[in-house]
Image: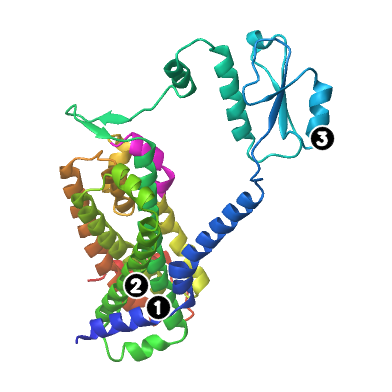
Amino acid sequence: MTKWTTIAKHEYIYNVRRKEFLFMTIGLPLFFLVTMGISVFLAASSISHEEYRIGYVDKTGLFDPANFTKYADEELAKKDLLDNKITHFFVIPANYTATGKITIFAGKKDLLGRSVESQIRNFLIDNLLKGEKKEIVERIKAPMNSEYFTLDETGETSDGGLADFLVSIAFTGFFMITIFTSSNFLLQGVVEEKENRVMEILLSSVSYRELLVGKIFGLGAVGLTQVLVWLVIGLGLLFSNPLVFAMLLDRMHISAPLLLFASSYFMLGYLAFASIMAGLGAVATTSREGQQMAGIFSVFGAIPLALSRFIITNPGSPLTIVLSYFPLTSPITMIMRLSTAGVQYYEVVISTVILAVSAIVIIELSVKIFRASLLMYGKKITPKEVIRYLSES
């Protein structure tokens, strides 16, 4: 086993046992699930299982009772409402046909007021369209059952809309959290080992390059482990409800090439960000200083997420193209574009090549900074010194 693989194995085992990793990987999804479960439970417990009993006062003389209780005046309706004989009542004024306005009264605050309004709406439509065919009445109640398609440059149709937007955002957020979490582990690890002077011991046995490469790949494995755990949790939830799973499969048009390209962008994007974090860790004198410097580069990575709607709706705009080729924004931008089929394959090739070359260059530059500044304890390195380190052969 080579030295860098030994370092990678150590970094992996150490970091998967860290409290931060366990919280982000297992604790955070469970926290959201528990929070959502509590919210659903509280909402359900606040809903009365008793059916709505609705009354009405008709000042137009146009409406038949059907399943509702008809009252001659508001006072009688209010009395029955306060005596819990009905749960709601509404008043249809004399000028209803001109204004469409009605007044609804409830005996207590109703979180599901929209459900009551839906029943009243259907009651009004049924009465206003008395004599019309049942199909016409039902079509007025639900006038649309639409499918959404987009046309590409060749005139071919593809499914799209809100579902694709949500899928791409979820996919992007998934990769972004993983990349930034892993690279931040690397930043913290380098700074901590530098502060604790562990680096002196490590560098007595391995080279700077072996140490950096081992840390990068060890933390990369940590990121992949996080991805796998989330996938297992997500698939477990989906398989627990086959109907929802089948519906999502029908709407999520994620092809094998998309998964392949997304995986390559994840790996290359991670290498680029992790190498930057390693260099920052070597330059920083404290963890806080390192986090502050890392925030600058994290902002670049988050730009595509902030502009996600623009990128998805304008995949061919100059700004989107620039973000697709710039190394720090291309991974997330291209994942979003690939999720909506709004990108040409030659753009993927160009973007991937630029990202791969950039990752190699960033690694080499980080090795130089790593070698020149790693053992400088307590000394704040100036930008001029960093430039000098980078210019050295």
Q: Is 271 on the left or on the right of 350, as rendered?
A: right
Amino acid at the residue labelled 1: Asn
**Which of the two residues, 82 or 193, is positioned nearer the viewer here?**
82
Q: Identify which residue is drawn at 72% across, 14% down.
A: 93
State yes or no: discs 1 and 2 in contact (Cβ < 8 Å): yes
Which mark is nearer the camera, 3 or 1? 3
Residue 177, quarter of the rendered image: bottom left
10 Å neighbourhood of mark 1: few (<14), some, or many (≥20)? Answer: some
Residue with the mark numbered 1: 15
Main SS of the magenta part reads helix
Q: Which residues are magenta?
A: 303-315
Amino acid at the residue labelled 3: Leu
Above or below: residue 321 compared with residue 237: above
Q: Is 105 on the left or on the right of 199, as rendered?
A: right
Q: Position of residue 131 (x, y in %)?
A: 51, 10
Q: Which mark is residue 226?
A: none
Above or below: residue 386 compared with residue 117: below
10 Å neighbourhood of mark 3: few (<14), some, or many (≥20)? Answer: some
**Which of the two residues, 293 or 149, is positioned nearer the viewer here?**
149
Give the tally of numbered discs: 3
Residue with the mark numbered 2: 222
The first of marks 1 and 2 along the sequence is 1
Report if residue 269 lies within the magenta region: no
**Secondary structure type for disc 2:** helix
Q: Identify which residue is drawn at 73% across, 33% down.
A: 86
Residue 342, quarter of the rendered image: top left
**In this view of the protein, can residue 387 be seen by the observer?**
no
The first of marks 3 and 1 along the sequence is 1
> Gap in Å between the C-alphas at discs 3 and 2?
62 Å
**Which of the two residues, 173 or 348, is positioned nearer the viewer here?**
173
Q: Position of residue 302 (x, y in %)?
A: 41, 52
